[in-house]
C-alpha cells in the first residue's frame, strides 16, 4: 500500500428514507493496487461505490469523505464529477446487456465516451474505438463497431463495457461482479484481460464479488463487508489461510475443497439483517457460532489482530483452528 492512496474513503454513510444502508465505511485503494470487496448480497458492496461516485438517487442521504488523489469529490459539482466518472474512475457492471443502450450501435457508444473524456470525434474516434475493441480481444473489431448489443454474446458485451471503461484512460476501474453472468471459460478470459490491462497501464482495480475463487486469483488485498460495514481487511493470502472474523471464516467454510476427501459444506445460518431491523451490538451476532453476551452490547470496531490484518470482532478466530483451503 502506498503512503499516498489514490482513493481514500472515510466514514462513508448512506441512508434511504432515514434507513441506513452504509454505516461508516473506511477504505483505501493504492495506485495500481487490486482490492476486492466481498460479502453476501445486501451487504453494501455496490452501494459503497455508487455513493462514493455520486451515482445514488437524489433521495439518498450520503455523508463522509471520498478523496481522489487527495481532492474531495463527495458532493462535488456536477462538472467535476463528470470529469471523474468515466475519466479518472470507470465502473463496469455485472450485466453488460442492461448497461449498454440497445438502440445504438456499439461504435457510437464507445466513440461517445471518447468524445466526452478525450475530445475525439469523427474518423479519429472511430479508429480509436476499433483499437480499444482490439485491445480487449474482440474478434473482427472493425465490423463489430456497427453491431447492436443484442447481436453480441454476453462475453462480447462485457468486452465492449471494458473498452468503454478504458476509453477515458482511468486510474481506477471498479468492476461490479463483472463475470457473474458469464460461463467459466469466458469468465477466465475476462479476468485475464483485466490482469493484462493492469500490467500494461498501472491501473488500480476494485473487484466487487461474492466469488472467493475469483478474488484469490485476482486481488492483492480483501475487504469483507457485512451489513453496511467493513468487518475484515487483510492480504488475500492471509484471508484464505487465517480469516479472523467468524463471518469471513464462514464464507470460506462454504467453499468446496479442490482436493482431498469430500466433506459437507458448512452453510451460514440465517441471512443478512435488513437495514431497518439491525440487531443490537454486532450485526453478525445472531448468526455467529462464537456469539457471547458481550457481542450484543456494542458494535465492535475494526482493530488490528495481526500485522496488516484488521477485524471487527471481540472473539476473532484463532489461526490454528482454521483449516487451510485449496482454491483453484
Image (spheres, rainbow, N blue to C red):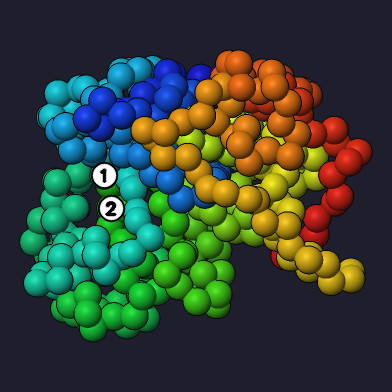
Against 256, residue 38 (above or below) is: above
As drawn, is 29 to the left or to the right of 117?
right
Instruction: State the residue at coordinates (21%, 22%).
Output: 75
Instruction: State the residue at coordinates (23%, 83%).
Output: 151
Q: Can residue 69 be seen in this view?
A: no
N-terminal of the two: label 1 or label 2? Answer: 1
Residue 122 lies in what quarter of the image? Answer: bottom left
Residue 248 x, y percent position in the rendering: 67, 42
Residue 226 x, y percent position in the rendering: 53, 37
Query: Looking at the image, which is closer to me, 297 or 197?
Result: 297
Mark 2 residue element: loop
Q: Is residue 111 visible?
A: yes
Q: Name the residue under label 1.
A: 86
Q: Name the residue under label 2.
A: 167
CB contact under 8 Å: marks 1 and 2: yes
Against 310, residue 32 (above or below) is: below
Q: Distance between the residues labelled 1 and 2?
A: 8 Å
Mark 1 residue element: loop
Residue 134 x, y percent position in the rendering: 36, 70
Query: Looking at the image, which is closer to me, 144 or 317?
Result: 317
Instruction: State the residue at coordinates (85%, 33%).
Output: 318
Instruction: State the residue at coordinates (74%, 62%).
Output: 265
Amino acid at each position: 500500500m502506498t503512503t499516498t492512496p489514490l482513493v481514500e474513503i472515510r466514514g462513508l454513510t448512506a441512508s434511504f428514507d432515514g434507513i441506513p444502508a452504509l454505516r461508516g465505511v473506511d477504505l483505501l485503494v493504492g495506485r495500481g493496487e487490486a482490492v476486492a470487496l466481498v460479502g453476501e448480497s445486501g451487504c453494501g458492496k455496490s452501494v459503497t461505490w455508487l455513493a462514493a461516485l455520486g451515482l445514488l438517487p437524489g433521495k439518498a442521504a450520503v455523508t463522509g469523505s471520498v478523496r481522489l488523489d487527495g481532492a474531495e469529490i463527495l458532493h462535488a459539482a456536477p462538472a467535476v464529477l463528470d470529469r471523474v466518472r468515466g475519466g479518472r474512475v470507470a465502473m463496469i457492471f455485472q450485466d453488460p446487456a442492461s448497461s449498454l443502450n440497445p438502440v445504438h450501435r456499439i461504435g457510437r457508444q464507445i466513440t461517445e465516451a471518447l468524445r466526452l473524456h478525450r475530445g475525439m470525434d469523427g474518423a479519429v474516434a472511430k479508429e480509436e474505438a476499433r483499437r480499444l475493441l482490439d485491445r480487449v480481444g474482440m474478434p473482427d473489431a472493425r465490423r463489430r463497431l456497427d453491431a447492436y448489443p443484442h447481436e453480441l454474446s454476453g462475453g462480447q458485451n462485457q468486452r465492449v463495457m471494458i473498452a468503454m471503461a478504458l476509453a477515458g484512460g482511468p486510474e481506477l476501474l471498479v468492476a461490479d461482479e463483472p463475470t457473474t453472468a458469464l460461463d467459466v471459460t469466458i469468465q477466465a478470459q475476462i479476468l485475464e484481460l483485466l490482469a493484462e490491462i493492469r500490467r500494461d497501464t498501472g491501473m488500480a482495480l476494485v473487484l466487487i464479488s461474492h466469488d472467493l475463487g475469483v478474488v484469490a486469483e485476482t486481488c492483492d488485498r480483501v475487504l469483507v463487508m457485512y451489513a453496511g460495514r467493513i468487518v475484515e481487511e487483510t492480504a488475500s493470502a492471509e484471508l484464505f489461510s487465517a480469516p479472523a472474523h467468524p463471518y469471513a471464516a464462514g464464507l470460506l467454510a462454504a467453499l468446496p475443497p479442490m482436493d482431498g476427501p469430500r466433506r459437507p459444506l458448512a452453510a451460514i445460518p440465517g441471512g443478512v439483517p435488513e437495514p431497518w431491523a439491525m440487531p443490537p451490538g454486532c450485526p453478525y451476532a445472531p448468526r455467529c457460532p462464537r456469539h457471547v453476551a458481550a457481542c450484543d452490547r456494542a458494535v465492535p470496531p475494526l482493530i488490528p489482530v495481526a500485522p496488516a490484518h484488521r477485524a471487527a470482532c471481540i472473539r476473532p478466530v484463532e489461526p490454528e483452528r482454521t483449516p487451510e483451503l485449496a482454491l483453484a
